Structures are given as C-alpha cells and as structure tokens.
Image (spheres, rainbow, N blue to C red):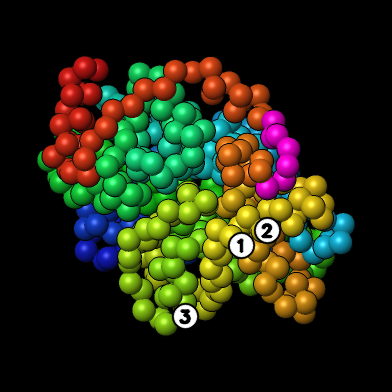
Amino acid sequence: MRFVSTRGRAPEVSLSEALRNGAAPDGGLYVAAELPELQAAHLNADVPLAEFAAALLQPFFADDELEPDLPAICAEAFDFPAPLVTPDAQHTNLHVLELFHGPTGAFKDFGARFLMGCFDRIAGDGPLTVLAATSGDTGGAVGCAAERRSSVRAVILFPKGRISPFQERQLTCWGDNVQAIEVEGDFDECQRLVKAAFADSSLSKQHRLTSANSINVGRLLPQFAYAAQAALRLFHSTGKEPGFVVPSGNLGHGFAVLLARAVGLPVGAVVLATNANRTLSDWHSTGNYEPRPSVQTLANAMDVGNPSNFERLSALPPDARALRVELVTDKQIEARIRAEYDASGYVYCPHSATAVEAWNRLSDAERSERPWIVAATAHPFKFAETVEPLIGRNLEPTPALAAILDRPPRKIRIGASLDELGQTLRQRAAAA
C-alpha cells in the first residue's frame, strides 16, 4: 500500500517511509492512497487481539518491507488485554472497552509499543529521534515503549502545569535514551514545536526525526485494530452495528473508529466526546473549523485547541465522516464519575467519564436501538487527586503503575521556541 499527504504536495511513499517520516514534508499527515475494502465475514474477531490485528492490518502492510514482520510486531505490542465489559446491569447496551491494561495504564500503550516495534526493524544505521508532544498519556507510553531500545532516542515535550502529578512522574522517569522536556506553554505549543522541527529539513535530517504522536500513521493503525475487533464481536453477537463514543483530544482515536467504518466494517453511529476545548464542537455546529487556544480541564489529555487529525478526518469520504460531537464540562465530568460509581461501583477516569456523559445524552431510542461501545482510555488511578474525593475511597494502582513511584524523575525546561528545542537535540546527540 502507498501513502499520500493530506495536503497533496508531497511524494507518495511506502508505509515504512511514512512511519520514518512521521509527518509529510509538506506539513500534512499521511493517509492511505486508497482505502482497502474489508469484509467482516473474512475476519475472526474471537482470536487474540495480536492475531486479529495482523490479519486486519495486512492490506496496509502489503508490499512493504515490514510485511513479513507484521505478526511479530503485533505479538510484541498486543500482549495485554482490551476487554469489553458491561459495568451496569441496568444498561446492558452499554459496553466499556477497557484500554488501560497496558504498562502505563492508557490506550496510548497500544500505539506506542506497535510503533517502536516497527522502528526496531526500519531504523537502519543509527537511532531515530522520536519526537512526541504530550497532553498527558502519550509521553508515558512513548517513554516506556522506547526505554532500552537501541533503535530510538525519545524526546517528550509536555506543557508545564497542565498534566496530573502522576502523569508527570510517569513521563519523566525513563532511562537515558528518553528525555522529558517541560515546555513553557500549552499542549498546542508543544505540538507546534514538533511540527516546526519536522518542517526544518536540516534539523529533521541531522537528527533523523520521526514522530510518536498520532500524526504518525503507525500510532493510528493499532487503534483501528482494537476498535474493529470490538465492533465485530458485538456485531456477531447481536446482529447490529455498534455505536462508538470516544473521548477526543487530538482526534486520533476518533479517526481510527471512523476509519474502521470507512473500510466497510460494522460501525454504526459515532459520537466524539470533548471537554471544554470546543474547536470540534463549534465545527460540528457551524461547519467552520477554527483552532483556538487550549483550555485546561480535568480531562487534561484532551486539552487540545487544534486537533492535528482533523486533516485526516477531512480526507475521508463524505459518507464516512458522519458523527456527532458532545461537549462536556468539568462539573459534568465530576457529576458523571460520582453518579456511575454510586449506580454500579464502576470507576471512570475523567476522560472516560466524558464519553459516558455523552452516551447518557442520547435519547432512549438511540441507546436501545443498538449496542454502544464507550472507550475507557485511562486507568483512574492516574487521576486519583480528582477521582478519589468524588467516590469517597482510595484507588489502588496496578503493579506497573505502582512501580513508577519508585523511579526518580528527570526533566529539563525550555521555552516554546524551535531554537531551544534544536539546541537540546544537539546537546543530546553530542552526549550520546
């Protein structure tokens, strides 16, 4: 399969080239030159996720140097579960896709581990420098996945004062080939720096830059895989196309679900839940896409004012772009966490709570006409300072999350300037 830029001003490339480049040289994002048509009947959703993903993603890897390695990459990346659970016996049509059972307790583990497995095989001579801007969970997942790999050096940019204390500990605690950088600015400033670094051809070539954000198509394919498997499982058991409700920040997760529908898999209605960052909500209401400064919220991984993957959404066929957007405030997040715990004992993180709140806004007819999948994107312990007062008890970390607390943090601080980022990259290269 070949890949093209959303902006149409860059050469067509192979999958491996798209992965190595991260973003296209014209500033756009890579998308498939032609979407495959997939048949639900030809996919076995009852096998383990690694086996399912290898079969599902094969058309995207066709004729690429990575094609023979795809089963091994999937086996390495998807060695933890993504269960569908029904938390509330009163709402049997609501299924929660738990995506937080990986080593850093967030859905980003799937994409980060998959991408690093690809980099191990295509890095060539010397390590790639993996740039990642994070609004919370991406940084921890990328740092964990990159640690001790000779194929990459990871540089993680995070916004000062905009992430939870545990998230900061989690993304600053990894080994010498991982550098955490605290940026004086918000997530959009971090993301702007990453894109500016790619646009600087000298800097990009000198440091062999690539991306681990969802601007990299290698981050989206794993999300497409687990969404597709969950949809097929419910479709086979109910005969109805399930709807999805997805917490949305940079829009990679939402795009992955829309991609599953675009290639012909049984995905019904799609609802994107946003926090008070209203760029997508306003676009859905008015038809005008206007980026704006990000607003700090309890669901901090969604604090994005200019979602990069909007370019990919716009590149989908018109009939594949149908969706609904629901904006959820901090007060509504708190109320939903408390209400769901009181009703069923199930604990949602602030991001997952935006999705459950959006599902509750559907009409009774909409909720009953099909099964619904809510994406639970992070373990609630990562936001204990928010969640524990709402449910009135302490949360227990998983063993992997508990181990983070024993690691010493390391970070440096820069202003939101490409010059300062470039200087940091040069210093790291010299010290390597």
Q: Position of residue 429 (x, y in %)?
A: 21, 23
Residue under circle 2? 336
| Vertical relation: 58 (above or below) 120 | below
Q: Is residue 429 magenta?
A: no
CB atoms of marks 1 and 2 within 8 Å: yes
Category of crowding for the residue at label 3, using alpha-carbon neighbours closer than 10 angstroms: few (below 14), some (14–19), many (at least 20)? few
C-alpha distance separating marks 1 and 2: 6 Å
| Vertical relation: 67 (above or below) 41 | above
Say which element carries label 2: helix
Can residue 226 be seen at all in this image of the molecule? no
**Residue flagged by tag 2: what amino acid is it?**
Arg
Looking at the image, is mark 3 or mark 1 earlier in the sequence? 3
Of residues 320 and 300, the one nearer the viewer is 300
- The image shows a total of numbered marks equal to 3
Residue under circle 3? 285
| Vertical relation: 180 (above or below) 66 | above
Name which residue lies at 59% across and 44% down: 386
CB atoms of marks 2 and 3 within 8 Å: no
**Residue flagged by tag 3: what amino acid is it?**
Ser
Magenta range is 390-396
Name which residue lies at 39% across and 65% down: 310
Name which residue lies at 61% across and 24% down: 402
Q: Position of residue 372 (x, y in %)?
A: 72, 64
Q: Nearer the viewer, mark 2 or mark 3?
A: 2
